[in-house]
Image (spheres, rainbow, N blue to C red):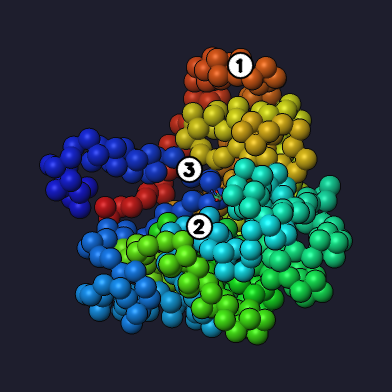
Amino acid sequence: MEWLQILKNTDPQTFEAITNELDRQRNTLDLIPSENFTSVAVLQAIGSVLTNKYSEGYPGKRYYAGNEFIDTVEKLAIERAKTLFNVPHANVQAYSGSPANIAIYFAICKPGDVIMGQNLTDGGHLTHGWKTSITGQYFKSVPYHVKPDGYIDLEEVRKLAAENKPKIIWVGATAYTREFPFEEFSRIADETGSYLAADISHIAGLVAAGVHKSPASYVHVIMTTTHKTLRGPRGAMIMVTRKGLEKDPELADKIDKSVFPGLQGGPHDNTTAGIAVALHESMKPEFKEYSLQIVKNAKALAEELMNNGLKLVTSGTDNHMILIDLTDLGEGNGILVQETLELCGIIVNKNTIPNDPSSPFYPSGIRLGTPAITTRSMKENEMKVIGNLMSQIINEVKGHQLPSNKEKRQEYLKKFKSDMKNNQVVKNVKNSVENLCKQFPLYTNL
Ligand code: DSN
């Protein structure tokens, strides 16, 4: 940890927390599909002196002096985004995915307009119109759903769009394991005159590498975060397509004005530099190999879980993600599986499944994915091992049930975790995970 020596001396407490987190990342299996490990080059860019600068405005049009080199960095990020995603306009300043989506609404919609997105419990994102999000309160949200087989119900999308004439339709989700049907959505949006926005936060790396179909020729605007499969720093980009500029030649300008001065002040220039570096990395042939392997790994892991008798939403995956339907274990038991896996060093997140009989906080599913473990160079053989270890743990959770009385849940969970810590299968799996992590070391150059 030579790179943090100065921090160690000035603030030992923060230093210790950071080094503990590094150890945690090294010694556990990160299966959260929205997480990844950036390169050290990206870490250097985001830890650079660019954090010191204010640069409200855009390259060549700033409100402060001294932005010569910031302009260079932002232009690099913009040009790389345009090339990689084949779009005529990119804004790289949004602080993260949710504010970027709000900026898109601010550019296109007025309060009270009808918006359509994939329902949250069907895999959609909060900012696509869920009731607790500002987007579900300032707009009239008409959500669409998935069919019993877990695939998006395109007939329902067409029917709801025809009836409600939404201003904007979202295609993209946070918990969807199949290719997004951009072309079909584009026909529907064209029929109703709606703007079509693709939220490709989860799959951006796959799209950049040509491993998932690109939405660029089908939608008007694309939003992506930069830290998931794209493997950059925490941030976001909003891109306007040729189709978007045909629909509204001022759309690019409206998006830029919506981000600044509409919603944000100065961009985080160190993050912009990290995005530029990540985009540069994702143009390399190795990134295509990496992205192909993410999908191969997800398919291999899905196969192993199903071979062990587990039920997956859509019975498999096309991308980096897998959703396990745990309803056979009883309602709301996603948390029991998440907590037990964490005791073994396998990090996943509890998630709703379509038609979840329980709630988003105590859902009946588990969401997992392969971007981070693929960054560690794991391949299909390791997926078999991991799928088998996970299945053993899920088997151990069988027979346990989260109380339906909400007040009893915290106490139950405490006792459940302390019992599971002493479970022999949990101990064995923990050992296997530690061994696997040692074989695939992380950040060896830090
Ligand atoms: N939190 C992100 C995810 O995990 O998918 C979405 O905002």
Query: Is tag 1's residue or tag 3's residue first in the polypeptide sequence?
Result: 3
Secondary structure of the residue carrying numbered label 2? helix
Q: What is the three-letter code of the residue carrying label 1?
A: Glu
Which mark is drawn over residue 33?
none
Secondary structure of the residue carrying numbered label 1? helix
Q: Where residue 265 appears, x then y in whole percent?
A: 37, 62
- Residue linked to disc 3: 29
User: Which of the 4 image quadrants contains residue 192?
Assistant: bottom right
- Residue linked to disc 2: 99
Q: Where residue 294 appears, x then y in whole percent?
A: 56, 59
Q: Is residue 417 left or right of residue 165?
A: left
User: Which of the 4 image quadrants contains residue 63?
Assistant: bottom left
- Residue linked to disc 1: 407
For the point 72% across and 54% down, the residue is 140
- Ligand 1 under 8 Å from disc 2 Cβ: no
Query: Can you tell which of label 1 and label 3 is closer to the viewer?
Result: 1
